[in-house]
Every structure is written in structure tokens, then in C-alpha cells.
Amino acid sequence: MKKAWQFTLLGALICALVTLPFVINCPPTEIPTPFQEKGVLNLWDSGPMTLDPAISGEMTSHTYILQIFSGLVRLGDEAKPVPDIAESWQRSDDGKTYTFYLRKGVKFHDGKEVTAQDFKYSWERACHPETGSQTAATYLGDIVGVKDVLKGKATEISGVEVIDNYTLKVTIDAPKAYFLAKMTYPTAFVVDIANVETDKKWWLKPNGTGPFKLKEWKEDEMLVLEPNELYYGQPPTIKKAAYHLLAGLPMAMYEMGAIDVAEVNEYYIDRATDENGPFYKELAIFPELSLFYVGFNTQKPPFDDVNIRQAFCHAVNKEKIIRLILKGMMTEADGILPLNMPGYNENLNELSYDIAKAKSLITSSKYGNAANLPPITLTTSGWGGNIPEYLGAIIQDWRENLGVEVTVRQLEPEIFSYFIKEEADEMFVTGWIADYPDPQNFLDVLFHTGAEYNTGNYSNSYVDTLLDQAGVEPDQTKRFNLYQQAEQILVDEAACLPLWFGKTYLLVKPYVKNYKLDVQGIPTLSEVYLEE
């Protein structure tokens, strides 16, 4: 997630850049009037960047796409693939062929029945070069024939066969434990060919299959979802989900009753965690399988020198930044795999805060001295020249501990996730949140040579070998051991500077029931209900 995170910090950045302690007393005229209808869930958000499942590559858009569209399988409560439009499937003895059996009577929002052919079309469209998907190779690339379509050498995916209207046969290039989990990602969702062919911006009026359908969308004002009365599963109980887009300061809106849920950032965490305060009983904390990190462009000087990368890692006091600036809301990251991730290595050797070591590494590098380093620019998401306080602290550590000046270049949040690979300077700040709970989704997706999301262009043939072996290893213990070996090398070679693992802090009104986030940090709105 994907993931924005895969990553977008738009909502958090807005709060971090403009929030001050006194804004909670904003005059009522600055707060939009909430819906007065019963059964309406009012939320704050920045709004999606796209509603095209084949294109979406960040969490903000996924939040809506997962309500409007669906696929063969979805992530269940235990973050494992469970049936969705496919009611069951069979896996061949060699682990390379999956036969999916679709539910009969599943319909698009307009009443047309979903068939296996619709999935074949959707996947081939996602892989067609003209679609411009940045996610198809990662999430569909295990299917035989996908690479040929991505390269324009074929128009059909040879590994996808429609047996009949309700049976789809899929062949992958090797047995992979995480294949079904990849099918829960939006790129694998089904779209309606007639809907897609209406217009290039067809997704402004999407004809999906999910529990909600798009009722209204006024950019930067309001987006309203309403229940899909044709949904095959348990229908949503809320009358509407009304997203107030960039409508004001979330905490101020929450306190005045304009929205029912608000994310808490470091500026308000003290009030939210005050046991004697008004918000304590409304606070919900959701752990995330997420990593926030500084990436190094390993093909650009000076970070083509491993000594320089290691020095920059040793020079940052993460513990102090988390404690003082982030108010302890995050967990310090020693490595890449988040806490609670299967395969997490408690014995990982980190590149700890060590100023003397950092300086010696600069001396040992081919540059010999910090004064000989070329100009360094860090790419981040934001606007207006304002940078988050934590980033300022990191840059200050590099200045004081290494004698290095770092320039910051900002990309607008709405394009950051989609263009960071092309736009990244010598360094970049980003994050990743699990699409599914498997080490492959972090280590392979982010650091394998040539991977779509390998923004830093890190390459190590031995690490590639370990990741490839882990991908097809049937024994889970051996598989996780291979991933742990690969992770240790990535940390040793400073493929990135891991900063912290995330948590989401939410205030939820007492009458909002069963509001929870999945491993991607996305709410399952179909399960929410409101008490009168």
C-alpha cells in the first residue's frame, strides 16, 4: 500500500504544517455544517487522487477503492486472503495453478452480472502499456504472460484462462506463498468494460462491485458514498459515508461535532491521552505494519558509497526525535520489517546512533572528508517550503554530527507517490504500509533489483538470490530465515535509513460502533454502525 503510505502523508502533513494549539478554539463559522441526517457517518479526508484500481498506488485512493470495488479475494480479519467474488478456489499440486470459482449473481452497481471474462479483461487492461499502471508488474507479475503484455509483446495474458462464466484458471511462474495475498490488492480488482470505455476519466462515475457506490464527488469539498443495494454480501448499515474534503482542521471539526472520527497527531496527543480529559475514552490506537524511512539513491554520488550511507544512518538520533518531537507515538525501527510482521527478527543488528562511527565512515569513504561530498538534496512530500519538525531534526543531526548540509526539495503530495521514482534526488523520505502481512511485501517489493518500488535503485545479486529463494520456499521456518538473512544485509549495507514503525491514533465518537482499521490502515466501512 501500498499503500500512500504506499504512501501518502497528505492528511498528516496538513495537520503538522498548519496546526497550532489555539486552533481548537476556531470560531464556529470556520466549521462546515455537518449532515443533519440520521445514519450518516461524517469523516474528514483530503480525497482520492484516482478511483481507477489499475492506477491507484497510495493509501488515500485505496481508502475509497476498497469500498467501491472488489476482487476475487480480500484480506480477512486475520489479514489472510478470504473469499470475495470467488467463493472458493483450488490450487494444483505443484502450486502453480489456481482455479477460482466465482459466486453466481454478483453484480456491478448497474445490475450487470460479473463473469470470469470481466476479470480477464480487467487484468489485461491493467497490464496494457497505455494504461500506465505503476502497480501491475508488482501485483500481477507472477502470472504467466503478464510481462509480455506489460512490454507490449502481447495483448492477452497467456496464464489467464476463462473456463466458463464462473470459472477462471490462473497459472503463475512458480509456487509462491504470497500469490493469493497479492490478489487482494486493487490492481487485481474487477472493472466494467462498458464503464471504462465511456471516457478517460470513467472513474469519476465508477461502476464497481463493492459494498458502497459513489453518490457525489465535489473536488476539495465533499465525497459521499452510499450503500450498494445489489451487494452480494452483508449490506452496510450506515445510510451514507460523507467525507468532508480539506474542509478545515480535523481536530477542531471533531470537537465541534462536524465529523465523527479524527486522526490525532503529535500536536494533540497529550490532550487525547489525558485520562482526565474529554477525549481519553474516545481514543483508539491501531498498530500498523508500516515503515517510515529515508531512502538513499544508491546510483547517485555520494550514496553510491556504502560508507556514506552507513554514516548518515549512524548520525541520526531516532530515539530522541521520537520521544521529543513525535511524543512517543511511533516505535523506533532497527530494521525494515515492522513489529508483528511474520518473520520479524528480534536479533537484528542495527546501525545504531554513533557519532564517532559515523565520522570514521566518512573518513573511510572515497571522499575522505565531509567537505568533499557533492551537493545533497532530499526529496519529500509537501508544499510552501514548510517541512515537518521531525525532518528538520534529522537534517540538523546530519549538520551537527557530520558537518553536511542537506537541501530539501518538495513534491506536491498529490504527485509524490506516483513520480517519486523518477523525481528522487540523492535522498528521499517516504514510507510503506503492508498490502499483506508477508516479508516479501517489504523486502522484495522495495529492494529487489529492478523492482517497481525500488526507488533507491539498490542492487545486490546475493540479496536477490535470497529473496528469490524465499519466494518459492514451502517451509515457513526456512522461508523466514532467508528473509531475515536478506534483511540483515540490507541493514548492513544501509539500503535505507529505517526511522520508525507507525501507529494510528484516532478519536471516534461514542455512537460510532465497530470502526476499525485493517493492516493497511483502511477502515472497513461496511461493518460500521451508528447508535441513535
Image (cartoon, rainbow, N blue to C red):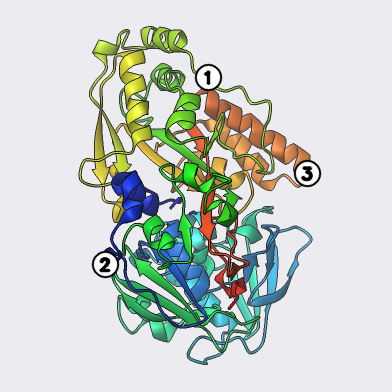
**From where the camera sits, is residue 347 visible?**
yes
Taking the view exactly as shown, the residue that stands out farthest to the bottom is 111
Q: Quadrant of residue 231?
A: bottom right
Q: Quadrant of the C terminus?
A: bottom right
User: SS for tag 3?
Assistant: loop
Q: Is residue 112 above or below residue 62?
A: below
Residue 85 location, quadrant: bottom right
Residue positioned 52% across, 20% down in the render: 351
Which residue is the extreme one toward the left?
384
Give the structural element (helix, strand or loop) at label 1: loop
The amino acid sitting under disc 2 is: Thr
Nearer mark to the viewer, of 2 and 3? 2
Q: Nearer the viewer, mark 1 or mark 2?
A: 2
The residue tagged 1 is 352
Residue 76 image position (x, y, % from top left): 67, 64
Does label 1 or label 2 sit earlier along the sequence? Answer: 2
Where residue 46 appears, as percent x and y from the top left, is 35, 61
- Residue type at mark 1: give it: Ser
Closest to the camera, between mark 3 and mark 1, is 1
Say if residue 497 shows up in the picture. Answer: no
The numbered mark, 2 or 3, whose residue comes first in the sequence reads: 2
- SS at mark 2? helix
Q: Which residue is mark 3?
A: 475
Is 513 placed above or below 351 here? below
What residue do we see at 43% from left, 60% from top? 255
User: Which image quadrant is residue 294 in?
Assistant: top left
Observer-nearest of 429 and 159: 429
